[in-house]
Amino acid sequence: MKLATLRSEHPDGRLCVVSRDLQTMADASAIAPAMIHALAHWDTAAPALQAIYAALNGNGNGNGTVAARPFNPADCAAPLPRAPQWLDASAFLNHGRLMERAFNTPPIPDFDTVPVMYQGASDDFLGPQADVPLPSEADGIDFEGEFGVITGPVAMGATPAQALAAVRLLVQINDWSLRALGAQEVRTGFGFLQAKPSSSFAPVAITPDELGDAWRDGRVHLPLHIDWNGQWFGHAHGGEMNYSFGELIAHAARTRRLTAGTIVGSGTVSNASRDAGSSCIAERRVIEIIDQGQPRTGFMRFGDRVRMAARTPAGDAPFGVIDQRVVQH
């Protein structure tokens, strides 16, 4: 099942069901006015939404069983325009080790055995084609391509298997970063605040079964293709994630319960192979330092565009596409 949120006068937007090929959609607000409502009442909402999805895919023109209309990602907000909680990990250890060099910080204790995670702002997520307003190019504007999950309720102390069973939807994320501010905030020991502006999401959130064998072991086994100003930047594969989403959710729930609508991110998708490129500028810059002695790639400028899409072997983009421009606030 594929779901999206249309922008509306309500801050949570309006829920719709999207066809498998992302060509048509049907309003689902009679079942749940917004996605957060559907997540809070998943046991009853999901079967009704699934019925719309089946009808939509069987009858794309809307004759008879479902009132379908063309799906336009430009009309979409983030699947959850605001969420109860946003937790982002660093589950790709290759990226984490490179970032230690970028920030000139000592190795994180137990990095190979205990996930690292921070709690970010969840009150103002951006849609897939929204301009990204930021205050200054001097802040080191960077994109970060990653995957994420949206959970149902998770009990405190849940095991990784129990946590994975709570996954309701999969999402694709651009977790924007301001690297100059991040370096300062890391040194305080209190974590990120100003360095993490609003994250962006691909238009469609999908149930795990939509990926078939590409969803296994609590990981998205697809490459995340990224272009910056029309030039290839990377296609790192989600299968190299060192911690599964079940492990990440269980880590978050060790001392507290999680409510329906919690979003957990994988952190920047990163592969050991240099041929895969990178999913953020900071990682490329560290590789340049290692290989060439100094960074050669600058951070983003106002007017720059970034495009991200996970792709199946057939070339389909199951989450749709993030395509955004950075602008001055």
Image (spheres, rainbow, N blue to C red):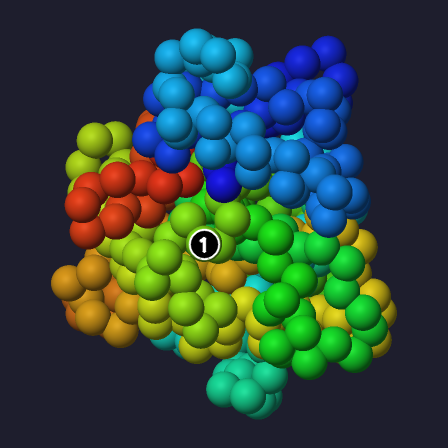
Is the residue 166 above or below the residue 104 in the image? Answer: above
Q: Is residue 187 left or right of residue 146?
A: right
* Label 1 crowd (10 A; few <14 / some 14-19 / many >=20): few
Q: Is residue 38 left or right of residue 126?
A: right
Q: Is residue 38 left or right of residue 264?
A: right
**Nearer to us in this view, 310 or 278:** 310
**Nearer to us in this view, 73 or 96:** 73
- Say whether residue 289 is visible: no
- Say whether residue 196 is visible: yes
Quadrant showing the C terminus: top right
Identify the residue at the far front of this view: 64
Q: Quadrant of residue 10?
A: top right
**Nearer to us in this view, 274 or 313:** 313
Q: Is residue 213 left or right of residue 16?
A: left
Say which residue appears at 48% left-offset and 69% top-offset.
218
Is the residue 50 above or below the residue 191 in the image? Answer: above
Q: Position of residue 313 (x, y in %)?
A: 19, 51
Is the residue 26 above or below the residue 242 in the image? Answer: above
Q: Position of residue 203 (x, y in %)?
A: 48, 31
Q: Secondary structure at mark 1?
A: helix
Say which residue appears at 33% left-offset and 31% top-offset.
21
Say which residue appears at 24% left-offset and 53% top-offset.
235
Q: Position of residue 125 (x, y in %)?
A: 62, 35
Q: Position of residue 46 (x, y in %)?
A: 65, 42
Residue type highlighted by circle 1: Asp
Total residue callouts: 1
Q: Which residue does the numbered mark 1 point to in the structure image?
A: 209
Say which residue appears at 25% left-offset and 31% top-offset.
229
Q: Quadrant of residue 155?
A: bottom right
